Image (cartoon, rainbow, N blue to C red):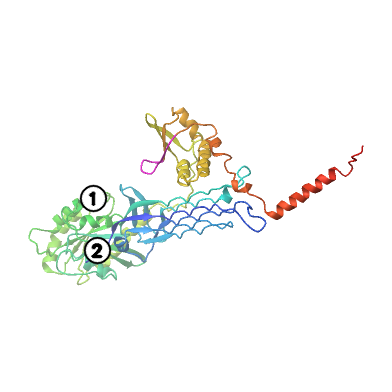
Amino acid sequence: MTTFVDRVELHVAAGNGGHGCASVHREKFKPLGGPDGGNGGRGGDVVFVVDPDVTTLLDYHHSPHRKATNGRPGEGGHRSGQDGTDLVLAVPDGTVVLNKRGEVLADMVGAGTTFIAGRGGRGGLGNAALASARRKAPGFALLGEPGEERDVVLELKTVADVALVGYPSAGKSSLISVLSAAKPKIADYPFTTLVPNLGVVTAGSSVYTIADVPGLIPGASEGKGLGLEFLRHVERCSVLVHVLDCATLETDRDPVSDLDVIEAELARYGGLEDRPRVVVLNKTDIPEGKDLADIIRPDLEERGFPVFEVSAVSRQGLKELSYALAGLVDQARAARPAQESTRVVIRPKAVDDAGFTVTRIEEGFFRVRGEKPERWVRQTDFNNDEAVGYLADRLARLGVEEELLKAGAREGDGVAIGDEDNAVVFDWEPTMVTGAEMLGRRGEDHRMDAPRPAAQRRRDREAERDEALGEYEDFDPFE
């Protein structure tokens, strides 16, 4: 069984952010010294990185579920939680990352190229970070956000300068074995090559890579044979080389018809019309092959193809072929636009962008969408009334309540914040103070009103007594 895998479906999950901590500082004679809850750590990202030492996607075929580590929760004493570790996944050069709909997310070419497939969740703020002049002792903390999850498809497209295409057993593997140091499997039966082979060719001062693409047959672009699986490996090549068998034993085939069939399959696949073509008439060391090459060569040259007669066995014509391919590769490289330096593109938000939308779904039901409202909902502990009140204040300051009124919402109408699959739904109660009169003084911790220590009470009584005695020092009861 082959160990080459060039297409996998992968489920990646970034780490969740750690929860913030709600804590109050305590020490002797100072039991309520203020909030000291630390923030939660950030969840780890899932990152794809191009590694030149990796040549297949086999590891992801066997283990299609990958998850980064979560951030640690915050602790008392202003101790923040540890960030989660990023999960770095090595992929071969030429890997394309797509979503389930087939849209390209990243085209990864070049060693060290990175792509963040899933971002870790933010850590929740502790109550120390939530304290303010008006909220001196918050009795709540924010929850950590869940990490991003997504299904992606990885496709490997071989990065090579020259692609050898042709019928099975046309001699492509033999040709690449003598042009480069590659050692592919060679045998006298069809489909001996089950994976693309890659070799490096040196011709004078030029160095280029050459790929042996598995055999194509009629209907390859529609899924027949192995062609559909490996046609993608031709896309990145600058030069296409048709390897034609001039000594085939099949009576119903000839080199010219083979060329027409392969060209038709490449045309159906699309996107290869601008690649220069070269025709190689192989196996001309055999007398019958040489005779056939002499017959068909004028016809091929009339079509505009550069034609080379070679023999992988006797190595006839290989030097001329390698130098000719080097020239075409150099021309293709020179024609490529110069790589521009990295530019930072800034896309400022519109002046009138409120950051959220309110949509009326049906009579008596509204949906709120937006990055901030949805993130705030994920960070809220709905078992804590104070945290719910804090969320209400944030939404009111953002203008959500005002937009609901403009959209025609009434008391008791249903309001959902988030998408259909993961939304928080509640009955709306419009109020300008967002329910503060029901929750009391929001942000004030009732524990701050606890009884004072005995020693503090004694000192306070002595101070009151001294103050009272001072007021009556000059008092004369007989006046």
Of residues 117 and 471, the one nearer the viewer is 471
**Residue extending furthest front?**
478
Which corner quadrant holds the N terminus?
bottom left
Q: Is residue 268 left or right of residue 145?
A: left
Residue drawn at 50 percent across, 45 percent down:
384
Evaluate whether residue 303 shows in this view. Answer: no
Which corner quadrant holds the C terminus?
top right
Looking at the image, is mark 2 or mark 1 earlier in the sequence?
2
Please check the rendered image and state whether residue 421 is part of the magenta-colored stretch, yes or no.
yes
* Residue corresponding to mark 1: 269
- The amino acid marked with disc number 1 is Tyr
Where residue 224 appears, x then y in whole percent? 17, 55
Please check the rendered image and state whether residue 350 is part of the magenta-colored stretch, yes or no.
no
Q: Is residue 131 left or right of residue 318?
A: right
Instruction: Determine the image quadrant of residue 10.
Output: bottom left
- The amino acid marked with disc number 2 is Val
Evaluate whether residue 473 shows in this view. Answer: yes
Which tag is nearer the camera, tag 2 or tag 1?
Answer: 2
Where residue 370 appears, x then y in whole percent? 44, 40
Q: Count neighbours of disc 2 (C-alpha within 10 A) and say few if under 14, some if 14 to 19, many if 20 or more.
A: many
**Residue extending furthest left?**
251
Of residues 119 and 323, the one nearer the viewer is 119
Q: How many labels does the image show?
A: 2
Q: What stretch is highlighted in magenta?
A: 418-427
Where residue 308 appears, x then y in whole percent? 22, 62
* Residue corresponding to mark 2: 195
Residue drawn at 81 percent across, 45 percent down:
468
Q: Count neighbours of disc 1 (C-alpha within 10 A) and say few if under 14, some if 14 to 19, many if 20 or more.
A: some
Query: From mark 2 to mark 1, how far is it between C-alphas?
Result: 19 Å
Classified by dominant secondary structure, the portion drawn in magenta counts as loop
